[in-house]
Image (cartoon, rainbow, N blue to C red):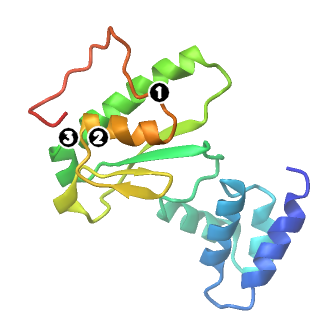
Amino acid sequence: MKGSKKIIDEIVERYASDPGGLIPALLKIHETFGSIPEEAYPVLSQKFSATRLQILKILNFYDDFTSDPRKKNVIRICDGFTCNDKGSHYLMEKMKLMFETRKKMSVGQEIYSVESIPCQGLCGFGPIMIVNNQVYIAVTAEKADKILSEFFIEPTLPKNSNIKYGKNYL
């Protein structure tokens, strides 16, 4: 990315004097670029006296960091035990099927990604769905359709969908 080195340098300089500045710098870089670009590693290593491996361990520990750029709209569904028991796996199945169908219809216009995330600590309110950092609780299929329509996503499944839902979750 042209000019990204300069932006990375500016971000890192902002946090370099703070002994705990590595994670805030990583968060700001990730927010700016949608991922941690390759050219960030040498700058981060030098300014924070951290090896590339140490930085990668931090990135792998936290689910919010990715090395691949995320799509414009990120949909995350909690896969914790309680949310799963309340039907989050059916929501995930529905989202994957819906976006797989959409991907075939609009090649090259993939602006949505669907991710499974670990427990968010909102077990009493599950299933949890997070769209672009906005948290939604007690999500059913109907509620998911309504939420997605707010993001200009036509939430209907293909008519010949063979998806089967359990209990009365969805």
The residue drawn where x is 69% and y is 77% is 50
Q: Is residue 1 above or below residue 94?
A: below
Q: Is residue 93 above or below residue 143?
A: above
Q: What quarter of the picture does the C terminus occupy? A: top left
Residues packed near mark 2 inside 10 Å, few (<14), some (14 to 19) or many (20 plus): some
The residue drawn where x is 36% and y is 20% is 157
- Amino acid type, mark 3: Gly
Q: Nearer the viewer, mark 1 or mark 2?
A: 2
> How far separated are the C-alphas under marks 3 and 2?
13 Å
**Disc 1 element:** helix
**Residue of label 2:** 143
Q: Position of residue 113 (x, y in %)?
A: 52, 39
- Amino acid type, mark 2: Lys
**Disc 2 element:** helix
Residues packed near mark 1 inside 10 Å, few (<14), some (14 to 19) or many (20 plus): some
Q: Nearer the viewer, mark 3 or mark 2?
A: 2
Labelled disc at residue 99: 1
Q: Is residue 101 above or below residue 166?
A: above
**Disc 3 element:** loop
**The one of 122 and 17 positioned closer to us in this rendering:** 122
**Residue of label 3:** 87
> How far separated are the C-alphas under marks 1 and 2?
17 Å
**Relative horizontal placement of residue 9, taking residue 150 as reference (left or right):** right
